[in-house]
């Protein structure tokens, strides 16, 4: 059967979301008295769960890290989500994979409703069987980490044959999440994680462009 079920990260894998995310992080940090003028400094925030990044890069305690996410959304939910665009070649890749009989899914650390809004905005929703994202309202079904989101998509779609599933992402969190759930992974270099990051995380394959990713996934 091969890798019939392909899970895609969203930010940095399907869309170039750096402008909106980094501006929203800049907005949130300013609320805490931290001024960052060079948005490139904030690129590491693209992809991983936001609370984790606020803690890792700015030593926020747990409470402030979670509070900062709500400040982030004051900007992102109004402006930032539209400061974003699919990477060149991504839609053609998705269309070709669907035409080849592959089933496509989204597994993102972005809140699920926002992920759906972004995909709808760019006309990409039609390519996916299921869009799964984070749930961070503090309820019993809390899921933030990538392995939790991957497992949620698998459970929601009744996918039990792990050898038929592969995760595609641009950051170590995607690769590590795939490993924790027992599925294989592909790291992409056109996003925000480099070859060293993806290799050290244990990516089974690493590829450079949406075009080379397409050829790889059609072979697997």
Image (cartoon, helix red, strand yellow):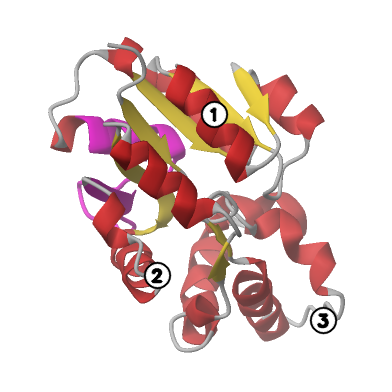
**Residue under the point 61% across and 78% down:** 24
Residue 113 occupies quadrant: bottom left
In this view of the protein, can residue 38 be seen by the observer? yes
| Mark 1 neighbour density, 10 Å: few (under 14) some (14–19) many (20 or more) | some
Give percent across and percent down for residue 50.
55, 58
Q: Which residue is mark 3?
A: 35
Residue 183 vs residue 119, the one in the foreground? 119
| Cα gap from disc 1 to disc 3, whole angstroms | 43 Å
Which portion, as a residue range, is magenta? 130-154
Residue 162 occupies quadrant: top left
Disc on the earlier residue, 3 or 2: 3
User: Do the numbered discs 1 and 3 sit on residues whose CB atoms are within 8 Å?
Assistant: no
Nearer the camera: disc 2 or disc 1: 1
Q: Which residue is mark 1?
A: 215
Give percent across and percent down for residue 87.
59, 59
Q: Which residue is mark 2?
A: 118
How many numbered marks, from 0 up? 3
Residue 134 is one of the magenta-drawn residues: yes
| Mark 3 neighbour density, 10 Å: few (under 14) some (14–19) many (20 or more) | few
Nearer the camera: disc 1 or disc 3: 1
Give percent across and percent down for residue 142.
29, 48
In this view of the protein, can residue 59 be seen by the observer? no
- Is residue 34 left or right of 96 when viewed as pictured? right
With respect to residue 13, does 153 lie above or below? above
Query: Quarter of the image containing the N terminus?
Result: top left
């Amino acid at each position: 059967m091969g890798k019939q079920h392909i899970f895609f990260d969203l930010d940095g894998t399907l869309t170039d979301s750096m402008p909106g995310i980094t501006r929203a992080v800049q907005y949130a940090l300013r609320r805490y008295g931290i001024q960052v003028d060079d948005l490139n400094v904030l690129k590491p925030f693209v992809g991983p769960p936001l609370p984790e990044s606020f803690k890792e890069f700015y030593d926020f305690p747990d409470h402030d890290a979670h509070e900062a996410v709500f400040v982030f959304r004051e900007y992102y939910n109004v402006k930032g989500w539209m400061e974003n665009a699919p990477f060149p070649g991504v839609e053609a890749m998705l269309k070709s994979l669907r035409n080849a009989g592959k089933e496509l899914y989204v597994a993102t650390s972005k809140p699920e409703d926002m992920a759906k809004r972004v995909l709808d905005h760019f006309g990409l929703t039609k390519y996916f069987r299921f869009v799964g994202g984070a749930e961070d309202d503090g309820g019993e079904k809390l899921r933030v980490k990538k392995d939790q989101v991957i497992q949620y998509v698998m459970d929601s779609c009744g996918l039990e044959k792990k050898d038929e599933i592969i995760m595609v992402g641009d950051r170590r969190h995607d690769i590590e999440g795939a490993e924790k759930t027992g599925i294989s992974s592909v790291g992409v270099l056109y996003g925000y994680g480099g070859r060293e990051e993806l290799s050290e995380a244990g990516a089974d394959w690493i590829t450079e462009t949406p075009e080379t990713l397409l050829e790889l996934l059609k072979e697997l």
